[in-house]
Amino acid sequence: MATEFDIRRYGFEVRAAAESDARAVRMLLPKMSQSATCLLAIDRHQHLVIGAAAMTSSCRNQPLLGPGVAIEVIPPCRRHGVGTTLVAGLEHLARQAFAATALYSAQRVDQDSAALEGWQRLGFTPLDTVEEHVLPVDQFEPRLGPLIERMRATGRIPASATIVPLYRVNPAAVLQFHLDHLGGDRGELYRKLRGRGVGAFLPRHSRVLLVDDQIKGCLLAHRVTKQRVCIDANIVDPQLRGGWANVWLKLETLRAGRSLGAREFTFTTFDHYTDTRSFTSKLAGTTVRTTVLMVRSIQQHNSD
Ligand SMILES: CC(C)(COP(=O)(O)OP(=O)(O)OC[C@H]1O[C@@H](n2cnc3c(N)ncnc32)[C@H](O)[C@@H]1OP(=O)(O)O)[C@@H](O)C(=O)NCCC(=O)NCCS
């Protein structure tokens, strides 16, 4: 028989999770890593776990400083203030541990989902969105090819600019370019750049833009299925943005992909990637998923 709870009558308490609570935390918050700091909500009558909340061990620092969090209350115990109390507990922990000024959702949430509503009920608001696009390869040549030809004919592309496959370039130089302009985990990136392990960058599909033999752009991709290639990074040197470089880099990567048997490309864009989003719609790309990062600022107290 299902357990009956009467939170209104008996109440609940929130306490730090102990090692012996690891299983309950894993069941309620399966996506949080073991290094997270966890709180549990316990019902005062049967002393059962009715909710959990956790905070990551590292922080985002833009636009506000704060860790990622996750919260879950079991369905029969919702709407009794458990979620709100867990959020208050997380705020307290985050201020103590990091002098945090905000809490972020540890994972992005699907737009228009029940989870997003849950975050909103707890006072979180959308900060930015990530869109996942699919681009069929048959649309780009007639649209981008003539554009690049025009740019070349009018002298906008320097004669010393070339685009080469990733395997022709020193991986350490591409790594440094990636770290300088997009950041990332040095070890993970170097592994992928050297073509090793899960998600390794495809040496023949991925392309690097060189001007006077200096790296000025790269487009790094990995294979999802035989016909689908995912673009992980599309980077152009800030001095060359908004012009020929990005269009040409995309064109050459899509050409390479098509000649190697790819039928479609997938990639993600953030809110500020406005040119990539308009490029996607011009090339008949579709948005297949939109996820949102949620944030809640922490009210500063007089004692702070
Ligand atoms: C989101 C969640 C943690 C909220 O937990 P909870 O214990 O129900 O939270 P509370 O009782 O503190 O309610 C928070 C607010 O939402 C409101 N609320 C809760 N459920 C609601 C519902 N179904 N419809 C409308 N309002 C609702 C409450 O009235 C309260 O508002 P108030 O502060 O103005 O009174 C819980 O619903 C849950 O675990 N959902 C599944 C997991 C999830 O979605 N996680 C992502 C969000 S963290």
Image: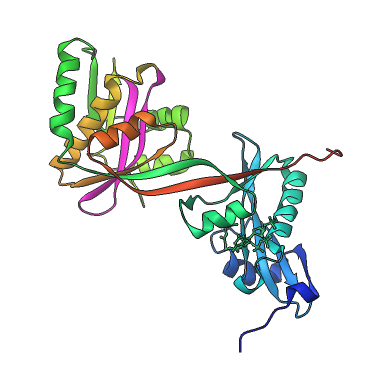
Principal secondary structure, stretch drawn in magenta: strand
Q: Where in the figure is residue 52, as x and y percent of width and height?
A: 66, 64
77 vs 89: above or below:
below
Q: Where in the figure is residue 72, as x and y percent of width and height?
A: 61, 63
- Residue at the location (30% across, 41% down)? 221
123 vs 283: above or below:
below
Magenta run includes residue 233: yes
| Residue interval drawn in magenta | 214-238
Q: Nearer the viewer, residue 125 or 300?
A: 125
Work out which quarter of the rendered image holds the C terminus and state it. top right
* 204 horizontally vs 219: left or right: left
- Residue at the location (51% across, 59% down)? 114
Whether residue 274 appears in this view of the structure is yes
Q: Nearer the viewer, residue 127 or 56?
A: 127
Q: Residue furthest right?
A: 303
* Ligand 1 picture quarter: bottom right
Magenta run includes residue 163: no
Q: Where in the figure is residue 283, as x and y percent of width and height?
A: 22, 36
Whether residue 170 appears in this view of the structure is no
